[in-house]
Image (spheres, rainbow, N blue to C red):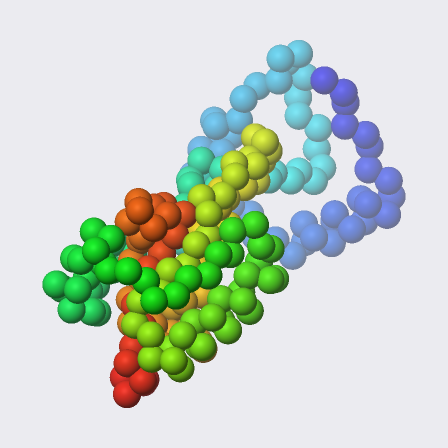
Amino acid sequence: MSRRRKLRPEEQELWNRVAQGTTPLPRSLRTAAEKAETPKSDGAPAPKGPRMTIERPDRAPERGGFSASVQPSDPRDRLQASPLAMDRRTHGKLSRGKIKPEGRIDLHGMTMDRAHPALTRFILDAHGRGKRVVLVITGKGKSRDEGGPIPVRQGVLRHNVPQWLALPPLVSAVLQVVPAHQRHGGSGAYYVYLRRNREIR
C-alpha cells in the first residue's frame, strides 16, 4: 500500500480553516468509530490530516433511482395492481384477449425521442375518432446490461409507455392501461382503453 503524501502548505492552511469551523464528535461516538476502524497491516499509525470517505448506498434511494442490487418492478405487475377504472366485465374480456383492438401502433425499434410524440399523436387521434380500445406495441426490449456499475433497464419503451400514458396530455384521454394478451403481443404490448369523448376530465 502506498504512503499518503504530505500536505502542501496551502493544503494544510485550507485544512486548518475547515477544522476550525467543525465541532468535535462526542467521546462515545469517537470511541465507537475508533473501534470500527481496521488496523493497518504494517502496524504503522494512521497519518494525521484530512480524511474523506465515500459511502456507497446498499439500497435504493427513496425518491427516484436505484442501486445495482435493486431492479425496477415490472410495469405489467404495476398495471395489474392498479385500481380498476373501467367496467370489470370489459376488463376481464380485454385481459383474456377477447376484444379486438380498433387501432394499433408499433413503437418497437424506435428511440424514445421518436416514440413519445408518435404515441401522443396516435392516442389523441384515436380518442378524437371515438375509438375505445387500441394496442400499443413496445417490444420486450433487448438486454444490454454489460455488468457495469449502473444497471441498464431492459425494455426502455416497455417501461416508459405506461408512464407517458399516465401524464398530460394523454392522461385525459386514457381510462385504463392493461397488459396485452399473448395473442396481441404479450409482455411486449399494452391495451389502452380510451375514455368516451364526454368523459374527458
Q: Residue at x 31, y 85 (%)?
A: 197
Identify the image quadrant of residue 117.
bottom right
Q: Residue at x 49, y 43 (%)?
A: 141
Q: Can you say whether 27 is above or below 129 in the image?
A: above
Q: Position of residue 69 (x, y in %)?
A: 44, 35
Q: Nearer the viewer, residue 73 or 192?
A: 192
Q: Can you say whether 188 is above or below 120 in the image?
A: above
Identify the image quadrant of residue 39.
top right
Q: Residue furthest top?
A: 42
Quadrant where the image shows the N terminus: top right
Q: Position of residue 144 (x, y in %)?
A: 57, 37
Identify the image quadrant of residue 21.
bottom right
Q: Residue furthest left?
A: 89
Q: Residue at x 86, y 40 (%)?
A: 8
Q: Position of residue 114 (x, y in %)?
A: 60, 62
Using the rendered image of the protein, determine whether residue 146 is visible from the camera's viewpoint: yes
Q: Position of residue 136 (x, y in %)?
A: 41, 59
Using the rendered image of the protein, determine whether residue 160 is visible from the camera's viewpoint: no
Q: Can you say whether 90 is above or below 194 in the image?
A: above
Q: Nearer the viewer, residue 158 or 131?
A: 131
Q: Residue at x 34, y 50 (%)?
A: 184
User: Horizontally, is 30 left or right of 131 in the view?
Assistant: right
